Amino acid sequence: MTLQVRTHPIADPGDLLARLPDRAGLAMVTDGEGIIGWGEAARLPVPRGPERFAAAADALAETAAAATVHDPVDVPGSGLVAFLAGTFAPDSTAETALVVPRVVVGRRDGRAFATTIAAGAAPPDPAEAAPAAQVALADAPRVRERGAGLDEVAWLDRVAKAVDRLRAGELDKVVLARDVGVWADEPFDPRAVARRLAMRFPGCHTVIVDGLVGASPELLVARDGPLVRSRVLAGTTRRDADPARDAALAAALRDSAKDRAEHAHAVDSARAALAPACDALEVDATPWILSLANVAHLATDLRGRLSRSVPTLALVDALHPTAAVCGTPTEQAASLIAELEGLDRGRYAGPVGWVDGDGDGEVAIALRCAEIAGRTARLFAGAGIMPDSRPESELEETRLKLEAMRAALGAAG
């Protein structure tokens, strides 16, 4: 397959998410910058299994090598680009999506650009890249719950079983997730859901990829030439409208031995995955508090310089799954998740974002997200379980995380 790719500068398009012309659009936007896309020039095949991200890297590299690219803008995200939504588990019944859009519109460091992509010998039509007129934000539909894979009582029991296994020394940490199904009288509009999320969580990575919609606070990895960065989150508390109580909650999180230990496992797993590819890797000496609209997290940033050219998808393959969404040690945690969790996570807690033909990319972990299919949606939230975890506290953490997506999907019915 040969793709013809043309990128050119454009006037500032304004609100990127408001420019998506249809519900099948694609996006990754953070603090107003990023890229959106629509149409489908190609969908690259990605097999299921533990080698799925390595296979995705090979498929994109093969496609890029055959493509004819004219890109005077030459920034990460211009030229040939594909959107990724990867599965958490290698044996998931869901598919890893790697989609090359027909049109991409982006803004990076104040520079706006558009890309058109066409298969075959015919050059792409630059007129297709004109940003659509701003789409009005639709009214939120009435949303009703339709059950979960496990009810809350059953989930509490699974957490208690996990705590027993942790205290027995089988592993150090495991992350258990739960899902909630919802439905509405009319189809959900992913664009509207994403815009509500972006308004409430502007600093998060707002994504729309192949039915997965979310606003993730956690960056798995971003590559810009030789530079790489990652942000690890683990350890959560609620926010409070009263500044004094809010500060006390943040201080308690910062001082919590349980949360600091949980966070350290996540940082160690990211460091171990990135270090072999880097000449230098800087890691925050102590975690800091990332405050969002509804919750606060312990956060650590990692910044490195690659020792050789490693494409973003290869870094994804090395990093996923981190201890922040799986546990420690990885193999034992994944096995316990499969035994206790009682659900197929699909693309929840998997890699989501974009990668380009030069190997650059920006990939978040699919958190605070939902899988949307017409009038139904499936929401997910998870919690890191440690030997001293209290099941009731972990359940409350998932409730706080689910609240954000419930509000973005629509009003309670």
Image (tube, grey):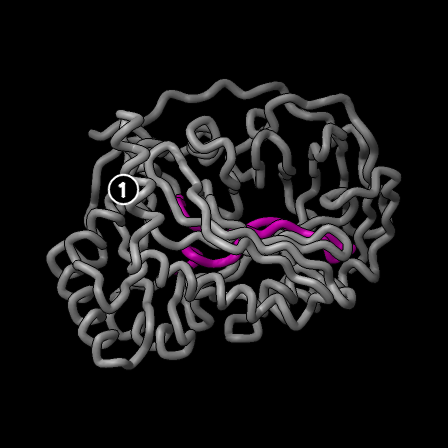
**Residue flagged by tag 1: what amino acid is it?**
Leu
357 within the magenta span: yes
Q: Is 42 placed left or right of 220 in the picture?
A: right
Residue carrying label 1:
400
Q: Residue at x 36, y 41 (%)?
A: 296
Residue 271 percent coordinates (x, y): 56, 65
Residue 322's place in the image compared with 195, above or below, is below
Q: Residue at x 78, y 67 (%)?
A: 308
**Magenta part of the protein: which range?**
345-372
Q: Is 68 placed left or right of 23 in the picture?
A: right
Residue 195 percent coordinates (x, y): 47, 29
Q: Residue at x 47, y 64 (%)?
A: 322
Q: Is 201 placed left or right of 128 in the picture?
A: left
Q: Quadrant of residue 319?
A: bottom right
Whether residue 142 is visible to the viewer of this picture, yes or no, is no
Q: Residue furthest left?
A: 153
Residue 37 percent coordinates (x, y): 64, 39
Whether residue 349 is visible to the viewer of this picture, yes or no, is yes
Residue 277 percent coordinates (x, y): 69, 69
Q: Residue at x 17, y 59 (%)?
A: 390
387 within the magenta span: no
Residue nearer the viewer, 392 or 146: 392
Residue nearer the viewer, 10 or 243: 243
Q: Secondary structure beneath disc 1?
A: helix
